[in-house]
């Protein structure tokens, strides 16, 4: 296992972020989402409709929606 850096994490393929409560998972997901929208680390930017984000709590879903 290695530390996750949302600024350098590869954006191709699938990724699983697993961590304890209060460790910044939602913040990390938001950062990765913005990188995909801006096209950082990929050939061209993606649209919101092209990105699937899955969380397992209503609180995290609401926080991401608000951001």
Image (cartoon, grey):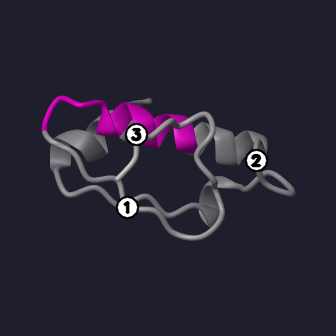
| Residue 16, label in figure | 1
As helix, strand or loop, the secondary structure at mark 1 comes to loop
Q: Is residue 50 above or below residue 1?
A: below
Disc 1 packing (10 Å; few <14; some 14–19; many ≥20): few
User: Foreground residue, 61 or 22?
Assistant: 22
Q: Nearer the viewer, mark 3 or mark 1?
A: 3
- State whether the magenta stretch is mostly helix, strand or loop: helix
Q: Is residue 22 magenta?
A: yes
Residue linked to disc 3 = 3
As helix, strand or loop, the secondary structure at mark 2 comes to loop
Residue linked to disc 2 = 41
Q: Quadrant of residue 3?
A: top left
Residue 49, given in percent of the width and then of the height, sits at 62, 62
| Residue 28, label in figure | none
User: Foreground residue, 22 or 4?
Assistant: 4
Image position of 17 (left or right of 11): left
Residue 47, given in percent of the width and then of the height, sits at 70, 55
Magenta residues, start to end? 21-32
């Amino acid at each position: 296992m290695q530390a996750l850096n949302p600024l350098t994490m590869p954006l191709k393929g699938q990724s699983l972020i697993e961590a304890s409560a209060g460790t910044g998972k939602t913040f990390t997901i938001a950062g990765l989402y913005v990188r995909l929208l801006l096209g950082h680390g990929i050939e061209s930017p993606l649209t919101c409709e092209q990105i699937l984000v899955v969380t397992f709590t209503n609180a995290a879903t609401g926080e991401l929606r608000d951001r």
